[in-house]
Amino acid sequence: MSSKDPLLQPFTLKHLVLKNRLMSTSHEPAYSEDGMPKERYRLYHLEKAKGGIALTMTAGSAVVAEDSPAAFGNLHAYKDEIVPWLKRLADDCHGEGCAVMIQLTHLGRRTGWNKADWLPVTAPSGVREPAHRAFPKEAEDWDIERWIGQYADGAERMQAAGLDGIELECYGHLVDQFWTPSVNKRQDNYGGSLENRMRFGLEVVKGIRKRVGPKFIVGIRMALDEDKPGGFGRAEGLTIARKLIDEAGVDFINVIRGYIDTDPALAKIIPITGMKAAPHLDFVGEMKAALGVPILHAARIADVATARHAVASGKLDLVGMTRALIADPHIARKVAEGREAEIRPCVGATYCLDRIYEGGEALCIHNAATGREATMPQIVPKSTGKKRRVLVVGAGPAGLEAARVSAERGHEVILFEAADEAGGQIRLAARALRRRELLGIVDWRLQQLEKLGVGLRFNKWAEAEDVTGEEPDIVVIATGGLPQAPALETGTDLTVSSWDILSGDVKPAKEVLLFDDNGAHPGMQAAEVIAEAGSKLEIVSPERFFAPEIGGLNHVPYAESFQQHGVRITIVRRLTAVKRAGNRLQAVIGSDFGDYVETREVDQVVVEHGTLPNAELYEALKPDSVNRGEVDYKALIAGQPQTMVRNPAGSYRLIRIGDAVSSRNIHAAIYDALRFAKDF
């Protein structure tokens, strides 16, 4: 019996019959090796194919020329050796009933000259892009002629690899840099009038079509309205799209609205937690009605209900749930099997995208298996060994994940938590309305633990005898950390922590200095709370640039709030001491760059310096453990079980994870839990 679910209806794109309406749009996870989609890249896309989506779009974007150096791990579509790698990826995904396409581009000005072969960045005109900061060379006639041929060469390689089609990236990249008056200042046949500005893009698509023939699918991902002073608007966007469809034979449009040459602009196209979900759906529906070709779209469509509405209401034909599929690559299969409630939610943290620039690879904040499919399971297998009794202490993200994975393995699991509810530091972060969606990390795991029959014991401050009294085989210490103050010459007792502010235990004073010696969310979120309380705030940081652990997209709402509330930001300065000054405090500020001292008189000094492990229970349990707490790092890295024995008389194996080891982040805590517990 066929399903009536709009998401599960087939769709025919030209000759290609897609089994449902769910897709992963093109994006670059930066898993390439030497510009090639090798095993890690292939397994990442294969997992989504196994998860039941109809189409996976690789690369974001594969570059067609040497003078488009990879800015964020892009695939090298200008090399012949990419063909066999992509062929294996396509063959594997096809074997799961999933179509495969790729996005091709030349980045134009959206990259840097000091990468790869150190060729000059080239664009339609010498207009600098703020995000990547290169000053581009204005394209010469021979550049334009060369690029047209290189686009066609790249498309031909993709066809030879057995892909089902290609998509040209045309928002913020070379082709639409010619379209937009804000970048194209040329005075020749490729600049000035709309007809001239369209010329290069039309020549590219016509050159591709001539090379690959009429049957190969060729689409465009483009902004149909830049919504930008000096850019092109809806009328010109529609004119460009119609020309591409009517004259160049474009088969589909992947609709975008906006521009991406600054972080705030990019955040409107890729909204994060606290921002509006699916902000462009109505616009996309209007474009679909105006163009009459298959329409694809993705922009924070993070849940199945929104995706279903988008398809059922006719606003689009194929719905991209790209970040949601990073969180749970099996969304389509769970929908088809009636297990929608089991979908791991995308919480909008956008750790995935921010980490591409900050850490060189996309990782989900709470699915540590994504991008690690070779060693970490998306579906935890049952243990083939004996059933064990696993006791987990601490119900923050690390403890919840350890309990979930252990229970999925088929073990008996007991979870102790000192507080009256689960979540740990996530509860602190989620006190801010803008970040409340982070609670999805906790709620999803609690739901899974209930289904798996895990014994949850809240308001239980565990002592060593409480743990040993349960006669466990494995003990997991996930007790987290407690805020620590930076090393000050004097006056530590006069400071309050970022946790004090976030919890509401301490109210922001009238004039506040916040010293952030961590550069991550806790300090920035505390600063946001202080600023929005109406306090006069100065943030002081010893870093040479601001909030280095926070990526560009997550930086946007903080920066907007700080600017709105007149927050003063001081970098390359260090808080060295705090002293009393009558009813106020004197903050003494120095520098790592030489002898320098200045002071501020304020009402309150807030400090953020990460956490210290809450390790008292761990230390108490070490002597009677089999391994005395020791970890075999070689086995851990290789994805193998912990078998080390340091105390043959020990009665349990002792594992410590998350911030109970050292101050890190949510992803690190969950990865710790998965990589240990998958082998229990």
Image: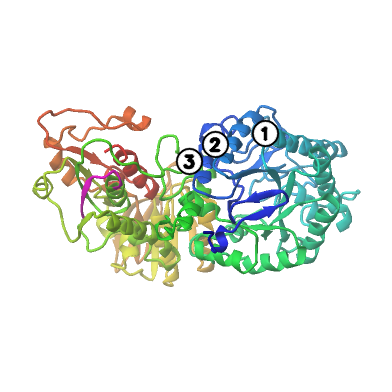
Under circle 2, the secondary element is: helix
- Which residue is disc 3 drawn over? 371
Rendered image: mark on residue 42: 2
Image position, residue 72 (x, y; %) = 59, 41
Of 357 and 447, which appears nearest the observer? 447
The type of residue carrying mark 3 is Gly
The type of residue carrying mark 2 is Arg
Of 434 and 154, which appears nearest the observer? 154
Under circle 3, the secondary element is: loop
Q: Please name the residue shown 15% across and 43% down the image.
A: 472
Of 639 and 637, which appears nearest the observer? 639
Residue 233: in sight, yes or no?
A: no
Which of the 4 image quadrants contains residue 102?
top right
- Which residue is disc 1 drawn over? 161
Which of the 4 image quadrants contains residue 21?
bottom right
Mark 1 / mark 2, whichever is N-terminal: 2
Q: Which of the colour schemes (rainbow, by chain, secondary structure, one colour) is used? A: rainbow
Cα separation, mark 3 vs mark 1, equals 23 Å
Under circle 1, the secondary element is: loop
Relative placement, left or right, of 539 versus 313 is left
Mark 3 / mark 1, whichever is N-terminal: 1
- Magenta residues span 408-416
Cα separation, mark 1 vs mark 2, equals 14 Å
Q: Please name the residue shown 64% across and 37% down the image.
A: 70
Image position, residue 174 (x, y; %) = 75, 46
| Mark 2 or 3, closer to the camera | 2
Mark 3 Cα within 10 Å, few/some/many (few <14, many 20+)?
A: many
Image position, residue 90 (x, y; %) = 61, 37
